[in-house]
Image: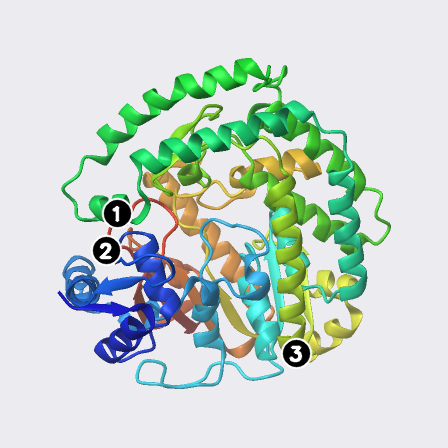
Amino acid sequence: MTLISIPEASKWASDFLEKEIMPTNISYLVQYGKVKKYGENGSTMVNLSDLKKYYESRNGTREVAWKKTLGNDLNWKLSFDNLREKDTTKHVHRLHPYKGKYIPQLVEYFIDNHTDNFKKETYFKAGDIILDPFLGSGTTIIQSLETGIHSIGIDVSEFNCMISSCKAVQYDEEYLQKSIKKLITSLDSFEHDNKIQEFETELLAELAKFNLVNYPGHDFKYKINQGNFNENKFAIEKEKEFLPIYQKLVKKYSIKLKQDKKASFLDTWFIENVRSEIDHVFKTIKQEKDIKIRKILALILSRTIRSCRATTHSDLATLKEPQITTYYCYKHKKICKPIFSITSMLNRYALDTLSRVREFNKLRKPVYYSVLAGDSRNINIFEKVEKNNPKFSKILKKQKIAGIFCSPPYVGQIDYHEQHAYAYDLLGFKRKDELEIGPLYKGQGVEARKSYVEGISEVLNNCKKYLKENFDVFLVANDKFNLYPEIAEKSGMKIVNQFKRPVLNRTERDRNPYSEIIFHLKSI
């Protein structure tokens, strides 16, 4: 057995894979039990043959297996598998979670001015205008700001527009810092129920003892990853074993877990003390006079309460039922607890937001953007932009839009309003679920597909009015029902090229081979 250090493993893996593998990448493999850890007290070592086995199975075999399942036309270059999570969630892209968004590098690949063996020409240049009629969390407009391209984003969801606007705004960093400090101080001075703090301190101590014995860190994760251990059975046994300890502490400190009302999302999915803190912080935010700052503070609170819902860590994106007891966590591989206070999360996300805003301010170019709330099937883009930004409107009317880069909703996969129900409840935005195209609640049947084709076609036909003559349209879709040829035809366009990419870093527990196609459309 040959043991090597983390830096040595990083160098070996970089040579083996012919691309840069950072020491942090190796540390991640150790932390999550992908390779076995040796050594203690800061001198972590890994087994070279163990590391080689991991990379051979993950990179060589995986690529072959995925192509066997998804087809030989799979473009592995567009997997961006060399990137770390911190790269794919850079600066303001991670200001707020959003299910179903694409990574910024995918947008950057198609809108910047580079060419390669797959992208043989450039489609956009500095000073052009790009449209995203399915704005979502704003990835396209943020990358356009970074690249030096004007942009317009449209979304039927007011909350999606708020997320995107908060990312795109250029803030006075000093004023934002003061406002964030005021917000944190307000929660710190809030009259907490001291029993909660004492309760959590004792609960965490009990959890630490229990987890140390039953889930010994890297070794336990490594055992699971070897595939010959019944994780589910063990999880159920240990959940039952710890539950009496938790229940005893709840009774000892007279902790009230459920709220009295169940009338709204905020009533149902938050423990009593958490709800009290949310209400207090939101009252503080509403006192802020600057509307831009008020919105980003509200976004910080929204991000916080999403992480503080009474659910398991692995089910944050797909709520099942309120989790008000301790539970086995499939993400962290140990017994975890519900959230009893938002203080820690609010502090973390507030400071993280300030850091990301500062980072993006250094990268952004002096170009225009406009975020429009409306239905892309019938919105008048010229009128809306003129109302929003008269200076940008003059440029828009003179040169028109060079093209589209967006990811339309997939058929029957996500209810886009429902995924942020907590925010709609908190902020009071009007929900417009009935205007979503291809929502989950309509399913994937024949009628749902027909409605989807009509909806996407209507969007493209409306947007065409504002595009220049020789436009380029890029649509990112998992077209398992082969609907896009019909959509192109109904939109008076033709598919001139398509790029099929594997989607590797999905947040759901489902890790089956999955791909999406970037359709390149032009006018007939």
The image shows residue 367 at horizontal and vertical percentages of 68, 77
Residue 339, relative to residue 81: is it above or below? above
Judging by the rendered image, the residue that carries numbered circle 1 is 219
Q: Residue at x 15, y 64 (%)?
A: 61
Marks 1/2: CA distance? Answer: 7 Å
Judging by the rendered image, the residue that carries numbered circle 2 is 36
Residue 419, relative to residue 515: is it above or below? above
Q: Amino acid at mark 1?
A: Asp
Left or right of 389, for residue 145: left
The answer to whether mark 1 and mark 3 are in CB contact below 8 A is no
Marks 1/3: CA distance? Answer: 47 Å
Q: Amino acid at mark 2?
A: Lys
Q: How is the image coloured?
A: rainbow
The disc, 3 or 2, on the residue closer to the chain's N-terminal end is: 2
Mark toward the viewer: 3 or 2? 2
Report helix, strand or loop for mark 3: loop
Judging by the rendered image, the residue that carries numbered circle 3 is 365
The image shows residue 294 at horizontal and vertical percentages of 77, 50
Mark toward the viewer: 1 or 3? 1
What crowding class fits label 3: few (fewer than 14 Cα within 10 Å), some (14-19), or many (20 or more)? some
